[in-house]
Image (cartoon, grey):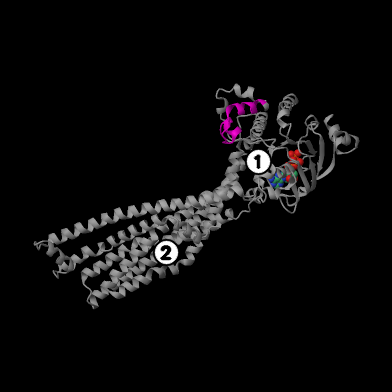
Amino acid sequence: MITFKTLFGMMLRYKRSLFWGNVIAIIATLVSIPIPLLIPLMVDEVLLEKGGTVTGVIDQLSSAHDPLIYIGIVLAVTITLRFLFFILSVVSQKFFITLSQELSFTIRVRALEHLKHVSMSSYERLGSGKVITHLITDIDTIEQFLGSALSKLIVSVATLIGVAVVLIWINPLFGILILIFQPLIMLVTRKISGRVGMLKKEQNRTIGELSDTLTQMCDLFGQIRASNKEERFIDNAIDHSKRLRQSASEYGIKALMGERYSYTLFLSGFEIFRALGLVMVLYSHLSIGLMFGIFGYLWFMMTPVQDLLSLQYSFANAKNALQRLNELLSLPTEPTANVSAQSISASGPLSIHTENLVFGYDEKEPVLRGVNLDIHAGSTVAIIGASGSGKSTLSQLLVGFYPPTSGDIFYNGVSVRDIGFPNVRDAVFVVLQQPLMFNDTLRFNLTMGDEIRDDEIQKALEIAQLSEFVSTLPDGLNTQVGKFGIRLSGGQRQRLSIARMVLAKPKAVIFDESTSALDVHTESKLFEALEAFLKDKTVIIIAHRLSTVTRADYIYVLENGIILEEGTRDVLEAIDGSYKRFINSQHG
Ligand SMILES: Nc1ncnc2c1ncn2[C@@H]1O[C@H](COP(=O)(O)OP(=O)(O)OP(=O)(O)O)[C@@H](O)[C@H]1O
């Protein structure tokens, strides 16, 4: 969880930037404070010929008692101060911009680091589009607040205090009124800013939904076109866009109204102060020059007042964006390992044993309803069963993708909860029926970014029956495969995934329908070539094809989430049960 307190803590890590940014900003403010007063003072001291501090100082420096010289020098000093203010504020902003970028980077890294350990089921529940919105839009909203808070809060407050001090010097009543006026407006408009913040949250939520819809639509565009369903999907995206338009305009209008309303309140107070200035010239000793000075300061206050008011709104937005980001940061993570990874990475094959394994994507509807497997190290087993019986789900659990709802999985006698899911995934590799590829080169898809020698890659390609195909490609391993591997055939993708498995050097392999796209001849050649590689490995084959299943020493028949039959081929063939029906169905 990230709170404003956490953000403040993160900020304190950049003490140097924070210190220098603020020191320079305060010097800039001090430089700017006299600006509104200098020229108006000329009204009293030069036009009304009353003399005073400014002309007194100039007289000490020069002997020319000329009104034009007084005005010229004051003008030159004022313009110099303005430029000095400009340079100092740019320097201080530089510190703050870098700092706010560092902070949003830190938040993004923290969210990405959390994503590394998030459990698959909670990730799937949230959806990629929403995850992306949290990582981009919400963090952006927080960054906008941090950027303006860092650069404007101290400067605006310092300017207002500085102005109040000068005004107290000119007239105490004015100064005190100005000091309490700004917080009063913020208090009055607090409710509106809270409401605006909620609308921002709603807008970011609709962005998340739209991005989810668009991601899915773009990823499956070919499928949509093949079914001639563009209209339906585009209409759906338009509906989401309408919702975004609605929430964005609601937010935009209310945010603008709120800020303008607060500002109008301030301007009304500003007019009252101006009228008060006139009244004070009439009924007190306030000079016309000082009255102009007061008017000047009232204008001067505009920017810090506007900044503070908009800060109030961006604070409300950031508060809601933080809440949304915390949804991502509080997604449950995978259980962590208790025993060292050593326990299954030690040499030798892996035994896999499940005890009363229960799992459901939705906890109320179990897909696996008490599965017991006893797979000896180095053996080859097959799991068969009707479509939807839970075979792929079982393989996803065995490979450490989801934690069991109840029951347990043991690898070499150690529970998956103790080993830790990442260690299981290192040791067990699942080759999927429809492996998805990165939109990158063949080499990247084989190595996933690891440094692997070319001769090793070549060997893996040979085993996977792919080397001939790759040798015909003009760019060889540097050939781009397209999004999800679209430029490869289904069988080539399956073989590429097998080559990836060979390079990953797992201790156990699950083939989940992973040769279904190959003809029987290529499949047979592939398994022959794999024989030496798989010799010391535990192998689980999930298949619908008898020729694939017959490679197994032992067979499990899964039905409706439970093991209905199990045994060697001979034993199962002798029973008039599901396995027999499976064989008969293959013989047509
Ligand atoms: N990621 C998921 N989220 C929610 N439900 C899922 C998910 N994957 C599978 N299911 C559901 O789990 C049940 C079992 O699916 P599973 O893919 O494990 O069956 P299978 O035996 O491998 O089928 P097939 O032979 O057709 O591949 C199905 O009812 C399916 O709807």
Task: Name the image quarter holding residue 549.
Answer: top right
Label 2 Cα neighbours within 10 Å, binned few <14 / some 14-19 / many ≥20: some
Label of residue 261 in the image: 2
Task: Name the image quarter holding residue 284.
Answer: bottom left
Q: Going by the image, does 499 lie left or right of 527?
A: left
* Three-letter amino acid code at the position of disc 2: Tyr
- Quarter of the image for the N terminus: give it: bottom right
Q: Which residues are magenta?
A: 439-462
Q: Nearer the viewer, residue 244 or 296?
A: 296
The local secondary structure at tag 1 comes to helix
Residue 186 in the image: above or below residue 248: below
Residue at image position (43%, 53%) is: 100
Q: Is residue 169 visible?
A: yes
Residue 258 in the image: above or below residue 219: below
Label 1 Cα neighbours within 10 Å, binned few <14 / some 14-19 / many ≥20: some
Residue at image position (73%, 52%) is: 405
The local secondary structure at tag 2 comes to helix
Gap between marks 2 and 1 measured at Cα: 60 Å
Q: Is residue 205 magenta?
A: no
Please tell me in which quarter of the rendered image ligand 1 is found. Answer: top right
Query: Where in the figure is residue 152, as x and y percent of width and height?
Result: 38, 59
Q: Main secondary structure of the magenta part?
A: helix
Q: Going by the image, does 202 lie left or right of 404?
A: left
Query: Where in the figure is residue 113, as x and y percent of width and height?
Result: 56, 49
Q: Is residue 453 magenta?
A: yes
Q: Nearer the viewer, residue 277 or 509?
A: 509
Label of residue 426 in the image: 1
- Quarter of the image for the C terminus: give it: top right
Query: Where in the figure is residue 2, as x and y percent of width and height?
Result: 53, 57
Query: Where in the figure is residue 539, as x and y percent of width and height?
Result: 74, 36
